[in-house]
Image (cartoon, helix red, strand yellow):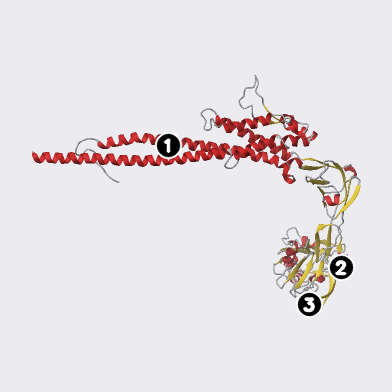
Amino acid sequence: MSISFSGLASGLDTSSWVEALVAAKKTEVTKFQTQLTGYQTTKTTLNDTRSAFSSLRTAIEKLTDAKFGGSMDLFAKNMAKSSNEDIFTATATNSAARQDYDVKVKQLATYTKALSKESASAVADDSTKLTNLGIKDGTFTAYVNGQKHVINIGKDDTLGDFKARLAEFGVKTEVDAQGVLKFSAQNEGDSINIGATTDSSNLASLVGLAKQEDGTYASTNSLYKASVLSKLTDENSGFNEQIKAGTFTIGNATFTITDKTTLSSLISEINNNDEAQAYAYWDDATGKLSITSKKEGASYINIEAGTSNFTDVMGFTESEWDADGNVVSSKMFTDAQELGQNAIFSVNGTTMTSTSNVVTSDISRMDGITLTLKRTNTEEDGNTTLKVSQDTTGLKDALNEFIKAYNAAMTKTEEVTATGADLHGETSLTSLSRTLRNYANSSNAGNGGVYKLLSDIGISTAAADGKNLDTNTYELKLDEEKLMKALEENPESVKSILTGDGGVLSMMESAVEQSLKSVTGFFDIKTSTLDSNIKKMNERITKKNTSIETYKAQLEKKFSAMETMIAKMQQNYSSFL
């Protein structure tokens, strides 16, 4: 950067002269920048307008895509309505016939349940930890001849520890062969009473302790050694027979028992396996495993022994193995399973059955309809019906969306083509707008349908007259009540006037598509012109700025030479004097 000192020799303000001369040149750049800003603003306006018409095209396509059929055809959507949704509900696809059906539910489908034939667990004994029985630590009270005795139950106490502490106060505790916990007086003639409101242990409530007629106490629930925390293959797991590591099958799923498998982890694995198609549950009160089918209907749960004897120990199968641990023979106890029942229902008086409460069309013979049975009909319910009709929700929403997009596009066009606006004079755009308005108000007499005008189906404009001179009279409005009536009376004619050959929306779609067409459409052509103008203007500004810088440098050089010459003349004159 050069530093100049104005008029050191001449005393003239040459720097100001240079700035003034350069500023005069820069007025041309300002003019170019104003033109550039105009092009850029016009392009932004054009893009906003294109966006409005793109939204219109998208809204139109939601309706005109009916020609592709299937899920894209909003006119073909059906709805199924039950007269009593407490009894059954229903859904309908596009293929369902629009009519009424009489439907009656006579029996619901239930699930098959397999239950261990006998208790799989051994009865609790003195070595059994109370916590394994679900008994929490805390206090437990016994009254002997009215005298209160409180013992503390610790988290590591066994049933034997519990019995010994009560024996100190004269209470006899035993567990019989069925696992029933009993309390009685040790000494003949003594009376006992068990439990107090101040007890903090859950023993009495857990086992369902009840006083008997003879003054003794007995549990309602039995006490068994095995629990969900038991490691299955441990010698002390608590089952009647030691379980071997290996495999077994439920449904189509094969499960593997290792030395780390607990009853809880195995139950979780069964319940989370889709191939098993069953839920498992261990009942502490009975020492039994139950397996319930995930599928309704009168079908057995497939349970097979493998290299493990687990299903035998649980009482579901009876098997023999060879010396290598391979199954030689095995049979499933079908009497250990309580079969579910099939659903029974009728359609228009014809009785049908289903293995599931979700009844598909291949079972009900109602094409495109799926029933979900909830409960059986009672005499008080009377007749229950299913009505299949056109689902107008999606269609109505799509029409409202179209009208909103149409009005937005028309408003935008009015705004950007007004006198003095960025796109004023763009005849292609005003012509497009005029064409769409004509389509919205024109008669579609050749479509063969009952309805010829959009206003016939509830889509109309507020026409200008002596009382209504609003500039927005081109805007469309929807009379939903009139639309619903037209759809109810003649849905095919509604579809025809909108999306059929020569339909209003079909013609609009074609016109809008042409304007948005790549390269040859109005918006691409106009954008290309603006981009070219913007590029040229940027080049002119750059070139002009370079020219001005050169001009400025030349002026500074000339004035500098003048100052040098004056200074030299002044020096020569001084020397002469």
Disc 3: which residue: 325
Nearest the eye: 541 or 357: 541
**What SS does tag 2 mark?**
loop
Disc 1: which residue: 33
* Viewer-side label of 2, 3: 3
- The residue sitting at the front extreme is 520
Across and down, in percent, residue 15 comes to 27, 37
Vertical position of residue 67 compared to residue 284: above or below:
above
Disc 2: which residue: 333
Residue positioned 78% across, 77% down in the render: 325
- The residue sitting at the bottom extreme is 323
Kindly indicate the quadrant of the structure image that contains residue 222: bottom right
* Viewer-side label of 2, 1: 1
Number of other residues with Cα within 10 Å of mark 1, as a class: few under 14, some 14 to 19, many 20 or more: some
- The residue sitting at the top extreme is 466
Nearest the eye: 400 or 236: 400
Amino acid type, mark 3: Gly
* Viewer-side label of 1, 3: 1
**What SS does tag 1 mark?**
helix
